[in-house]
Image: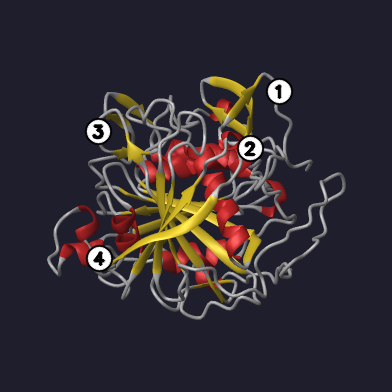
Amino acid sequence: MKISIKEISLRKDLRTQCTPVTWLPAGALLVVVSGACNSPLPDGYVPGVTTSFQLAAGWALSQPSRNWTVHIPQDYDPTIPTPVVFSFHGATRTVVDEEDISGLSVNGLKINNTSFIAVYPQGVAGTKGTTAWMGAPYSATGVDDVSFVLQMVHRLRKDLCVDATRIYATGKSNGGGFTNYLACVPATGNLFAAFGTVSAAIYTDYSFGRYNNCSISRGIPLMDFHGTADDTILYNGGYSNNALVMSTPYFVNGWAARDGCNLSDVTVSIDNVGNVSLGVVNVTTWSLNCRDNTSVIHFKIGGMDHAWPRTTLPAKCKGVAGNNDCDPTVINANDYLLPFFTRYNLPYVPQDTIVDSSTTTTSSLMSPTSSTSSTTIVAGSATIVTNYASTFTSSTRVITVTSSSSATKLLLSGITIFMLFAL
């Protein structure tokens, strides 16, 4: 049976208002969201421009400075709650690389008929001296990428008119592995409405790869893309960086099982889109009886190597085809990923886990090998420090988030964490 995600009837989801109180399922926490709707853009944000931010070292105990970029859509409207997509780069890569290969800053892309804010976080140097995210054998010891994500979400909800029920996460390679990691951590698994993994590096013992060490409290929508010719993260699994990488079929079947889907409900289609010589795409879907009406969809792309699926070359290739991201594929991932995101929004407004004063809030941060601990994170202030030329826009602004009070340090306690969401 041939399927087309574009042809799937998308349900009409209730959207949040600018400062909403949303309905929640019985037993859930009622949270009032106060954001920046109906307010002008803060300094540094410009529609159609990618802005760079820096969180100064000391924002949390023993945590390094962190950087990320935010692309505001050209038609951003501060009266309309706007979806957000986080896109995490692969190991050794940068925010510039991820914005380029993902194409998520291209004008006109929409989720739920609304242009979205694209966020590109920057990893820090791991044990190999190159950028990395949690969930890999080469990740930096002691670096808390999950708390960094919570800080970015807090900043966005404070500065911009964000639809907090429509925040999504995607990433490639190690960034895809970290996206899977975020889906398994309660503080972020209940924060993002849906997830997309691309050529994901799922290290079995580092990124919640095993079925029984990823605990979820709701159905997790997931779309995955992986090429059969990927010789960096093998489709059928193996070893990379002296660590076991699980096979892609095992990975997606694991998510279908976690979501409680009927595992016999597997629809496989062969999609001969465009030039068949580029490869055949097999689409496998699990959707029957899945928890919370979610679904897991996997694209097996014949002949694709370690790449973000797209039919055109990213800028970094300079018009010359090659391998990996410079090797065009038969489909554009975004043509399927964004409609998939449109299908899913949270039925509640997630609580902001960051505070702007000495008031404390706890969040649930977990790793595959450690027990849960309680944390307190306090946000700092932001100032523009410099400008520089952007690859994608006329100008890019750099903003530094600074923290001077000791109250902004990450406080560790021995208190057992309670879930932030009573679902």
Q: Earlier in the sequence, mark 1 or mark 3?
A: 3
Q: Badges 2 and 1: C-beta atoms under 8 Å apart?
A: no
Q: Which of marks 2 and 1 is nearer the N terminus?
A: 2
Which amino acid type is shown beneath numbered disc 1?
Thr
Task: Give SS at disc 2.
Answer: helix
Q: Which of marks 3 and 4 is nearer the N terminus?
A: 3
Q: Which of marks 4 and 2 is nearer the N terminus?
A: 2
Which amino acid type is shown beneath numbered disc 3?
Gly
Q: How far apart are marks 3 and 2 (CA)?
A: 29 Å
Labels 2, 1: front one? 1
Q: How far apart are marks 2 and 1 (CA)?
A: 14 Å
Q: Residue at x 54, y 56 (%)?
A: 168
Q: Closer to the camera, 73 or 39?
A: 39
Q: How far apart are marks 1 and 3 (CA)?
A: 34 Å
Name the image quarter holding residue 139: top left
Query: Which residue is denoted by mark 1 in the rendering?
Result: 416
